[in-house]
Image (cartoon, rainbow, N blue to C red):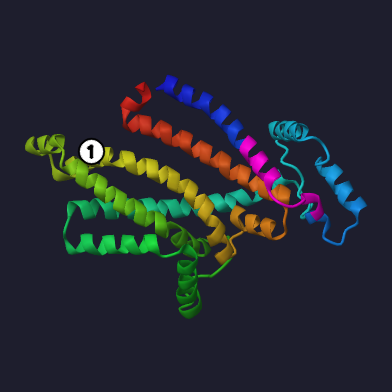
Amino acid sequence: MTAYILRRLLLIFPTALVVVTLIFVIFRLVPGDPAQLIAGEMASRDVVESIRREMGLDKPIYIQYAYYLWGLLHGDLGISKVFRYGVLDQLLLRFPATIELTVAAMSIALLVGLSAGVVSAVKRGSVYDQVSMLGAIAGVCIPAFWLGLMLMMVLAVQINLLPATGRGTLAQLVLPAITLSAHQMAVLARLTRSSMLEVLGQDYIRTARSKGLRERVVLLRHALRNALIPTLTIAGLQFGYLLGGSIIVETVFAWPGIGLLMIDSVRMRDYTMVQGVVLLYAMVFLLLNLIIDIAYSYLDPRVRYD
């Protein structure tokens, strides 16, 4: 197990270097002159050239790349040319809000999705199974921004039960967390149901039942653990999807996280800040994949010997 974790940790460094290089190249290929965008259309040529020198854009591309890597190694993501503050400082300031929203949404999705999937598999063909799967299909099809607006209109405006925007209280977290979790909740419910149905048909489940084990023990100890292997992989990836999906939800509910910062930065054409946000998302995805692989090897020991 330790050797497997060390191998995965060693692999993450070259992967991170490839990701960082791709981000650097992609942002250099974006049409338009960042210096001109910052200076404005009416700025003089001298002002544009001054900004270009300040950003290091007058140097060869490989020199810019070396400066970029050197800055990353020292925790320097640059200075926002629009907001005039350090990119890393702003990311660290906003990231807790996004993590808070994502963890809340993921918790709801896991709790409701796994429970609904297990019960649907056990009660296959029942009214509960049909209703829960119908709800899962609706959760997959309904766009997050539309669901958020409907929840806001009904629960915040019409009934005045929950606040519509802002951050700081548990009540303010409910609507954006439910909105963000809806799609993942539906995916996990459907996946858990199909995995449980496949596992419940295996010989070792019949053997466990023939030994006289209680049905709860058979389901939780023998069936659910094996059924969770594909579900865990998807859940980890869905956590990364939630981080990305928070961009829309944070905008709808004015949630002061990375997603809202991303939208503001794109609107203001803040080239440096957008690059920092994309880099942060990419690194979080890499870390999530590492955690998933380790958890996967724990559930299925064959993985660590491949």
Of the pair 168 and 225, the residue shown nearer to us: 225
**What's the magenta region?**
21-36
Magenta segment's dominant SS is helix
Q: Is residue 79 above or below residue 173?
A: above
- Residue 230 vs 190, above or below: the answer is above
Q: Position of residue 147 (x, y in %)?
A: 45, 68
Q: Quadrant of residue 141?
A: bottom left
Q: Is residue 210 above or below residue 159?
A: above
User: Which quadrant would the C terminus be assigned to in this image?
Assistant: top left
Q: Is residue 19 in sight in this rendering?
A: yes
Could you say which is closer to the camera, residue 135 or residue 178?
Answer: 135
Q: Residue at x 27, y 41 (%)?
A: 227
Looking at the image, which residue is at 33% across and 41% down? 230
Is residue 26 located in the magenta-colored stretch of the structure? yes
Q: Is residue 92 visible?
A: no
Give the amino acid type for the residue marked by disc 1 in the picture. Answer: Arg
Which percent across, then down, holds residue 142?
41, 65
- Outermost residue to the top: 3
Q: Neighbour class for label 1 at 10 Å: few (<14), some, many (≥20)?
A: few
Residue 32 placement (x, y as % from top left):
74, 52
Secondary structure under the numbered disc 1 in the rendered image? helix
- According to the picture, the residue beneath numbered tag 1 turns out to be 221
